[in-house]
Image: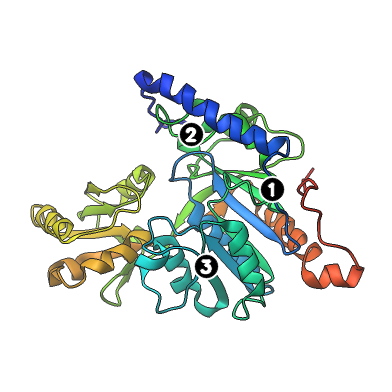
Amino acid sequence: MRTEGDFIKINECLLPLSWIYGLGVGFRNWLFNVGILKSRAFSIPVISVGNITVGGSGKTPHVEYLVRLLKDTQKVAVLSRGYKRKSRGYLLADMETPVERIGDEPFQMKHKFGDDIHVAVDKNRCHGIDTLQTDVKTSDTDVILLDDAYQHRYVKPGINILLIDYHRLIVYDKLLPAGRLREPKDGKSRADIVIVTKCPKDLKPMEFRVLTKVLDLYAYQSLYFTTLRYESLRQEYGNTEIDIEDLDPATNVLLLTGIASPKQMVLDLKPHCKSITPLTFADHHQFKDKDAEQIAQTFEAMAEPKMIITTEKDSTRLHSLESVLSDDIKRSLYVLPIKVEFMLDEEENFNEKIRSYVMKNSRNSILAKGRKPKDDNKDTIKFI
């Protein structure tokens, strides 16, 4: 039976190393808490989206949700470190920037939203925020979304959003390397908003109450629950679209992924097809020619009718194999886009919190009211 935290695996023999790791992370957090290491606040609205666990909590679809929420009224910039990119320093993406130079998630967002938003990468988030505001190409930025910056404490965001995977609740997990936690569980206290992600659509009222109790948040923190909504499958090398509900139940699916946690996709696709053959690579895997051979061999061994399903993030990296993939593989390759939906009818409540913060802290609002930008050493805005 499905339960919260059911994807967690603890390597008990590594717990002594987790204790040592915890000492180091705890000391670093203490240096920030007492002010020895400094956090910078900014006059421009800054919203951080991140997690405490390693990968797989749904950061990209939640950042994209914020982009859709704000882009029609504000000029949005997304700032990421560009994990595993083959470049250094600050880099502003355009539609011609290759995925290798900015990373798969920034590449995906730039190509999805185009010139409606700015997308930049910089490991030094403070430098990245400063550059976005001073560079003539991006000086029209009204709000900055930080992707995966919960542990980047040199920035003090106006709103800090913590994502927690329903299947990997931090209260049941352990620190690296025995578990998947980047920092101790009490790090959740820095969040203004906590979102439990990837929730099953059929959660009962009692389960919401249990989750709320076990997370044990402070009064100033707002708690939300989201679930995944799958859009129509899109043929990567063609124009065909297929709604999941319309899949032939006799179809055999090769689920090709290089993400941290594909298990929820397996659970969600199972009712719509005959069988699923997972072909799983490491998170952010850079596909090579030998991977194309493995894909071809695995797919060839499957019975008809069959198709290949992958994620949007993986599709950006699969383009490096375009010249070596067979026509049959290309015809059979479909991308499964996902969006997030808020549960318990809390979408508008969340939206209003975000809009209100951005409007109250926009440059126009500050100038109109004659207010000074927030002091770097002041507390972040808290929601009660």
Q: Residues within 10 Å of mark 1 (few under 14, many from 20)?
A: some
Nearest the viewer among 355 and 17 is 17
Above or below residue 321? Residue 286 is above
In percent of the image, x 77 and y 52: which residue is there? 376
Give the label, 2 or 1, closer to the camera.
Answer: 1
The residue that label 3 is drawn on is 120
Nearer to us of marks 2 and 3 is 3
Q: Residue 195 appears in which quarter of the rendering?
A: top right
Disc 3 to disc 1, C-alpha distance: 21 Å
The answer to whether residue 318 of the structure is visible from this angle is yes
Q: Position of residue 244 (x, y in %)?
A: 35, 59
Residue 296 in the figure: left or right of residue 150: left
Taking the view exactly as shown, the residue that stands out farthest to the right is 370
Q: Which residue is mark 1?
A: 39
Q: Earlier in the sequence, mark 2 or mark 3?
A: 3
Q: Would you identify the image quadrant in which residue 351 lies?
A: bottom right
Q: Position of residue 264 (x, y in %)?
A: 38, 44
How far from the left and from the top, in percent, is residue 18? 45, 25
Q: What amino acid type should be assigned to the residue bearing mark 3?
A: Ala
Q: Amino acid at mark 2?
A: Leu
Residue beneath disc 2: 181
Q: Are marks 2 and 3 in contact (CB under 8 Å)?
A: no
Question: Label 1 sits on what residue type?
Answer: Ser
Per the image, label 3 sits on a secondary structure element best described as strand
Mark-to-mark CA distance, 2 and 3: 27 Å
Task: Tell me if residue 179 comes above or below residue 161 in the rendering.
Answer: above
Q: Residue 196, position in %: x, y?
A: 56, 42
Q: Check disc 1 and report its element: helix, strand or loop.
A: loop
Q: How far is mark 2 from mark 1, CA to CA?
A: 22 Å
Q: Looking at the image, which residue is at 66% across and 35% down?
A: 31
Image height check: is 36 above or below 271? Answer: above
Of mark 3 and mark 1, the one earlier in the sequence is 1
